Image: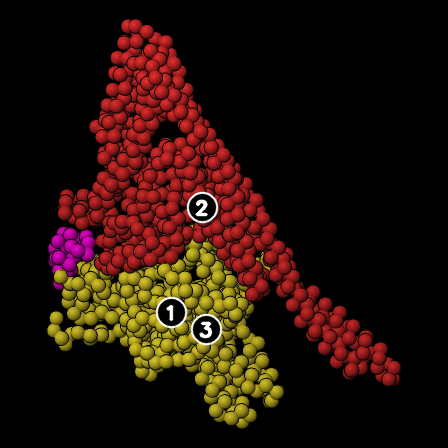
Chain colours: A red, B yellow
Amino acid sequence: MSVTADPRSARPETAEMAGLLDRLRVLTAGTGRPDLADRLARARTRVTDPRMRVVVTGETGQGLSALVDALAPAAPGTRERPVDDEGRLLLVGSPGVSGVDSARAAAALPLVAGADAVLFVSDASRELTEPEITYLDQVRRLCPTVVGVVTKIDRYPRWADVQRANRRHLTQADIDIPLFPVSSRMLAAAHRTRDHALAIESGVPQLADHLRERVLVNATQVLHAGVVNDVRAVTDQVALGLNAELTALRDPAAGTVAERRLHEARVTADALRDRTAGWQIVLADGATELGADVDHDLRHRLRELVREAEADIVSSDPAKRWEEFGSWLDGRVAECVQANVVLAETRSRELAERVAIRFADDGRVALPALDLGGTEALEPVRELEALDSRKAGIVQRLISSMRGSYGGILMVGVMTTLAGLALVNPWSIGAGVLLGANTFREDRKARTARRQAEAKTAVARLMDDVLFHVGRESRFRLREVQRTLRDHFTALAAEMTRTADDALRAAGEARRLAGEGRDARIAEVEEQLGELRTLRVRAAGLVR
Amino acid sequence: MTRSFDGVLLDNAHVDSALVDSALVDSALVDSALSDSALFDAARPVLGDDAVDACLRRLHAPLRIALAGTLKAGKSTLLNALIGHSVAPTDATECTRVVTTYRRAPAPVAEAVHDGGRRTPIRWPPDGTGKALHSLEVGLPAPLLERYTLVDTPGTSSNSRAVSARTLAYLDPDDGVCEADAVVYLLRSLHDSDLALLRRVQAQVGRGGPLGVVGVLSRADEDGPTPAELRDDPRLDGLPRDFLPVSGLLALRGRTLRQDEFTALAALARRPVAELDAALVSPGRFLAATGHDGLLDAWGMHGIAEAVALVRGGATTAPALAAALIRRSGLEGLTRILEARIGERAAALRMRAALRELRGRLAGRATRLVAGIDRALADDHALVELRTLGALPGLTTLPVPTRIALDRVLGGAGTRPTVRLGLPAGVSGREMHAAAVRAAMHWRRRLDDPLLDPRARRALRAAVRSCEGVAAGAAVRTRAS
């Protein structure tokens, strides 16, 4: 489930933030920087529409839908349902997964990656299982805000023991998330009987509060912090130009001070250019490395899997349990692909951060949203093919052993005819039986070996296919990531260069200005700078 | 509660005797068993009494039934319910960590089997499990264990891979097949891990492994799929689809109901409905209102609510409540199907095992006797029926109504001729003969279909043979009367 905010019911700080951004945009546009003004407009859209998506996930049959109904009683049946009155927090039900090694779990992961928070649901009838822990670990890596929910506490008197066991398992797996015991049935009963105390005992209001106060507020804060970052960057850049102009205006006589200031402005601009010049190399190198790493990771995982599968094939006759082997292999392939996607996601973020450092030492630069979604690559490519020589007919096996015994009879029979015996005599028959049995045995061994070889080829072909499809999807996605990063940082670099150039130009122009025009301009620039400072301080004040 | 009530087990003998007596051996089986025992007598001069008696002991070895399923599916609770005592430890968190065998013994005994086969006596219930432990064996003087040896397996998708691996090693060993004669598979909702394990067990049916898989839908609460949903689930193609809803907890509480528990439950039932409903909303509320924490621990919220409803519905004595709980739990349905599928054929299956051993000991001697044994072993129709029944869910080329009809005629619901042919109980020998011949002709006609795949053809042929067997038995009876 996800939660989104509605501009109709904007909160005070949101309204203030929006007003502030509007004012700053007018100011920025006035100084001839439409590019920065656009950036502020985008930030404003983000602030006024801060809908948070909370995805609810967990295994099937754990009370997912009942929990969604309890948390978001309004608008039943819709996919995204609001938890709070303002509609800022939207719950999105994901299809229940059934074991982490399943294709359905893989399908839920992209939904999780795009979420602001994830509710992981497991009921109180049993502790967390190993597949659940593995899934939770992947979820946590894709979405930093995960909240655990233990449902159905009205039915299991020992839920506290289960909760303790869950905590133990989570600690062991090094997963630190809050766990909320809830019961949607208790909440329903509380609504029926208007029993406020029971509603509190159900744990649902606490969970809703946590979502509203911690998760929503946290996410809003992260969003606001990002916007304040934007404000800081924009005010810095606008102020740089204004300051340079002001210095030139104040000392028109081309005095040494002004010369020095102008020189300083030039140095600053050059430094900025130098700093940003390297980013394209960082990105290009990083992207190549990222692609190679992700590809290598996938190949490595699949190679390990092939090794495991081959060991399994060699250990017995593969025809006996081929279908079951196929489903096992499908599950393991899905697991490998999932782990690979998680790696690609985390490494892409790291790359974005690495590039961002080229723009500001503290990396406090807006990062683009990276969408690694798309589940196509995660679905099984195709089935493992059937084995041709699945079953050898008994007739065929008999014929081949007859062939063997025929040779035996002939061989020994011919020799014994020299001793005056008939061609078919006890000796030649004995040799025929021995050789026949031998052929029969050899034949069976050869068949098993052939089936094993066939099975290995089938596995290798499937892996080739997986590598081809998944590799292609993954390369496509990574190219998309690179393009997003390039566009984002190109715009950022262009902004910064333009700021430096503007500062030089403004300073140069200012020196040519004289008389009253200059005084008026000084007052104007000073006023603008003052307002920029105020806006900046106010924006900083909005983030606690 | 007075002390004298504590620990007094109500008379559950009727349940046990029902389980044991329902092995109604039909006359045909007794006939063949008699001639088979003549074979054993004939072997006495050759092998000596000791060796023959050792073979005959096989006749009394119980059948092995394994309980399998995912973590916390209620395997141990169901096992306790079947035995009628709380033997297997159960807890809110994962509890069964090694494969545990429950067999009959004159006095309670527990042994740990270490890797390598060494056995050491242990205290029961075990406290913590050793690293190198292979399995546990518990001997108990319980009537059900005379007929069945029960095997409790740890849940798959456990918290530790090692525990799941132990279950897999038992149910689908790398070398050979599962040693259980039947597998009872419990699930609470259908997950991919369930499907994978069911497939692995089903794959061994008819290959010398288990003779069938009996599905149980473990009803711990009202959630989860219904049996009808499971029957229509496409993921179960080729796997057993009939999942019997059984609540192991209700059955166990019914079978071990104590007078003090009944008194407490009856007192609860006497409370005003609204007051009790308010208390049953949550464990906390229930404790605050009644203080029965022992009851809550053993019965759970669902169990208390069900028991109170039964008391209000007229189960006003402890034995009546016990019987009502067992009825409500669906346990009888499970034991009935176990009896119909495995139990009623137990005599034939055991006889085969004993004869095979006798034949092995006779190797090379008394050729005429061996020929007689081979003749007896050649009639393996009971085994063929069982294998066909086990493989029926996989015969997807046959339409569902045909598969249901095959299940009945092959003795899936019981081996009595009237059950197989769907005739009323008191039918005359002549009518039965006519019905059996008609049925045999019906199935033989179906064999003419040129598009039948070999497995379906085998199943239809087995049905013809079963009908002919019933017809022959009926003819013998008609002539005798």
Q: What residue type is labelled 1?
A: Val
**In this view of the protein, can residue A114 be seen by the observer?**
yes
- Chain letter for mark 3, please: B
- SS label for mark 1: loop
Amino acid type at image mark 2: Leu
The residue shown at (19%, 47%) is A189
**Could you give the CA–CA distance between mark 1 and mark 2, rounded to whole angstroms?**
36 Å
In percent of width and height, residue B469 lies at 52, 71
Task: Name the residue carrying label 3.
Answer: B345
Mark 1 vs mark 2: tell me if same chain.
Answer: no
**Vertical placement of B56 versus B147: above or below?**
below
Give whichever of discs 3 and 1 has the lower sequence position: 1
Dot 2 corresponds to which residue? A343
Disc 1: CA contacts within 10 A as few (<14), some (14-19) or many (>=20):
many
Q: Which chain carries label 2?
A: A
Q: How far apart are marks 2 and 3 (CA)?
A: 56 Å
Say which of A388 and B240 sits in front: A388
Q: Which chain carries label 1?
A: B
Label 3 residue SS = helix
Residue A90 vs residue A379: left or right? left
User: What x and y, as percent, mark residue A286?
Assistant: 48, 39
Front disc: 1 or 2: 2
The mark lying in front, picked from 3 and 1, is 1
Q: What residue type is labelled 3?
A: Arg
Q: Residue A146: which quarter of the image?
A: top left
Q: Give the range drawn in magenta.
A: B267-290
| Residue position for label 1 | B98
Q: Where is residue A285 in the image (x, y as percent from the top left)?
A: 50, 38
Is residue B415 visible in the rendered image? The answer is no
